[in-house]
Amino acid sequence: MHDWPGRAHVETLRVWPSLEQTVRRIETQADVFSGVLLLGSLSRGEGDAISDVDIVAVTRVGMWDDAWARRQVLSAGALVTFDRFGDRAGVAGHNWLTPALTKVECLVSEPGEGGMRLYGNAVVLVGEPDLPDAFERKPALTRQEVDAYAAELREQNVIPDIERAYGDLIVRLRREVRGVVE
């Protein structure tokens, strides 16, 4: 796994073992995956006790179907998994809760035009340094935009009950741990 500014801090967080294990599992599937990108607060070195792991398992060109078929290897031992499909070909979410109650949000995406958009910072954990350049880049989403998207998913009733309950727990923990009023 490559180094990045903020890694030393992330290594102190409870999510570190889940991140490290997931990256190792992706690396063992090198015939279908070309790299791993880290997104969100961990990529900025700003994670805390209630952060989740946001990653992209980048497939080799033309290997998305094979990579998606192997997604359960990435989440082996999870308490629960939940998949989410959007409207773009070559990208879908495979998410899970670990036994330590860490949420891993793993997008499985093929690089290239028309696929996934990268919003904000992306750190290459595995793969070539220019790996993010294979995706359409967008400015980081604001907290309000993220919350509006989550509310939209809830309204559409596409979030599994366990993921919804976990999300509710995180909102309450933010209030207590971070002092955030929602």
Image: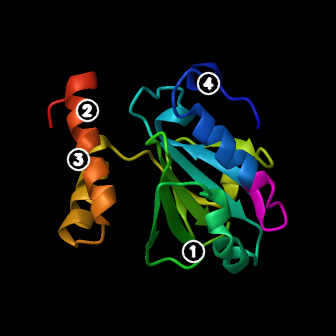
| Magenta highlight on residue 27 | yes
Residue positioned most to the right: 31
Q: Is mark 4 on a helix, strand or loop?
A: loop
**The residue under label 3 is which amino acid type?**
Asp
Separation of disc 3 and disc 1 at Cα? 33 Å
In the displayed structure image, the side of residue 143 where residue 41 appears, left or right: right
Q: Are marks 1 and 4 in contact (CB under 8 Å)?
A: no
Q: Please tell me which residue lies in front, 86 or 26.
A: 26
Q: Which of marks 2 and 4 is nearer the N terminus?
A: 4
| Magenta highlight on residue 155 | no
Residue 52 vs 137, above or below: the answer is above
Q: Do the residues labelled 1 and 2 touch (CB within 8 Å)?
A: no
Q: Mark 4 points at which residue?
A: 11
Q: Please tell me which residue lies in front, 182 or 71.
A: 71
Residue positioned most to the left: 181
The magenta stretch is 26-34
In the displayed structure image, the side of residue 111 where residue 16 appears, left or right: left
Q: Name the residue under label 2.
A: 173
Question: In percent of the image, x 27 and y 57: which residue is there?
Answer: 164
Question: In percent of the image, x 59 and y 32: which residue is there?
Answer: 16
Q: Which of marks 1 and 4 is nearer the N terminus?
A: 4
Q: Mark 3 points at which residue?
A: 168
Res 114 label? 1
Question: In percent of the image, x 57 and y 74: which residue is there?
Answer: 114
Q: Is mark 1 on a helix, strand or loop?
A: loop
Res 96 label? none
**Image-quadrant location for residue 176:** top left
The crowding category of the residue bearing disc 4, from other C-alpha atoms within 10 Å (few below 14, some 14 to 19, many at least 20), is some
In the displayed structure image, the side of residue 142 where residue 65 appears, left or right: right
Separation of disc 3 and disc 4 at Cα? 26 Å
**The residue under label 2 is which amino acid type?**
Leu
